[in-house]
Amino acid sequence: MSLSYWLDQSKEETIPKDIVIIGGGIAGMSTAYWLQKYDPTLQIALVEKYEFGSGATGRNAGFITCGSVEHFNRLVGKHGKDEALEIWKFSEDNLTFLKEEIIQDNAENLLFEAKGSFSLAGAKSEFIELQDSAKLMKELGVNVEVINEMDIKTRTGGVSFVGGVKYLDDASVHPIKLLHHMKGRIEENGKNVTFHENNEVHKIEYRGDNKVIHTTKNKFEAPIVVFATNGYSPLLENFFKDKIFPTRGQVLATEAVPRFMEAPCYANFVLDYFRQLPTGQVVIGGFRQLQKDVETGYSDETSDVIQEALEKFLRDHIPAVREAKITHRWSGVMGFSVDGQPMVGALPADHQLYFVGGFTAHGIGLAFHSGKALADSLFEVNPIPGFLSAKRLQ
């Protein structure tokens, strides 16, 4: 991240802090929340390049789902039953913590619904895999329901699917409303967390045991820095270059139509996803598999190929919105980790530089608990779970 001489508005004085968190999305805000909860006296600065939530937090579809980017049976195949269940339970706890700590009785204002989510199969081979996955999940105590083609049509409005499963404990939300409500909860709990929007970090230098964090507007000095920059992490620290990769996702939204969906849906091996908001709009994203060579890097452009695929999916599979006007098209940069699991910890070369990120398209479903895991580590409450620790990648 470079800074032009002409755009440098930084001041000479340095602002002392105990912790500086870089990144004002769901990961950074969650980390600030838990650090303040553990020690309200901590002087914390939360620094964001643009406005809070302007990255992946404000550009996703608002799913709060359990697990990871793969069907559960594949998660078991990669990690074994015990660790796969630990990964699943970690994301279940993420939702529990969000409801208890942040959402509370504000569900309606946050467009929060805990109605589960569907995973739909367009081919018999995927349905067989989903059924096998559901059987395994039930054996391990995960709440899941197998559904048939008619169930899908009546409960989701979807057609040309052969079957699927419903994960009963998933949810959805308005991600930016959630983020700002979390910020409000932090402000209610004390005045020692300061928020700095439109404040891009362009350099971190060492000053004795402290770090000086140079931004476009300020200089902060603190012994501890947290990178909550997800897909943008490699721009600030070389450690992440082979561990977290910027990956673009594209989405569109339609005008409001009468409610017809029971809960959000995934399709095509979790690559494509759609939901209907409580206010009636339909949001759909995915199809990055059509342009893998393009859907990397930091551009937030949309492409005709993927946007046309999203529209075609609506026409082919969601009759209720075939005639609905498309009101918004956008893309966002996510952080995909090298093995699909998030990363929490400290840099091997400097244990005062912490990080949380690599959510691989499941940030809302993982970041709040990941922020807690980081705070746990700092306060030596609990060790970071093995599947989260970046030591697994070293």
Image (cartoon, rainbow, N blue to C red):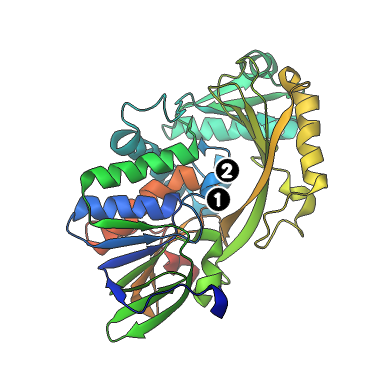
Query: Which percent across, then down, holds residue 137?
Result: 49, 34
User: Circle 1 — which element?
Assistant: helix
Query: Which percent across, then down, holds residue 121?
Result: 69, 30
User: Circle 2 — which element?
Assistant: loop
Q: Dots 2 and 1: beta carbons under 8 Å?
A: yes
73 versus 254 height, above or below: below
In front: 125, or 149? 149
In front: 135, or 285? 285
Residue at 45% x, 32% y is 139
What amino acid type is highlighted by mark number 1? Ala
Most distant residue in the bottom direction: 208
Q: Which residue is mark 2?
A: 60
- Determine the CA span between mark 2 and mark 1: 6 Å
Q: Residues within 10 Å of mark 2 (few under 14, many from 20)?
A: many
Q: Quadrant of residue 6?
A: bottom right
What amino acid type is highlighted by mark number 2? Asn
283 versus 19 height, above or below: above
Residue at 61% x, 61% y is 246
Image mark for residue 160: none
From where the camera sits, is residue 45 visible?
Answer: yes
From where the camera sits, is residue 2 visible?
Answer: no
Residue at 29% x, 42% y is 185
Query: Which percent across, then down, holds residue 314?
Result: 75, 28
121 versus 301 height, above or below: above
Q: Residues within 10 Å of mark 1 (few under 14, many from 20)?
A: many
Query: Which percent across, then down, holds residue 257?
Result: 65, 18
Q: Which residue is mark 1?
A: 56
Q: Quadrant of residue 164?
A: top right
Query: As drawn, is 197 to the left or to the right of 245?
Result: left
Q: Quadrant of residue 296?
A: bottom right
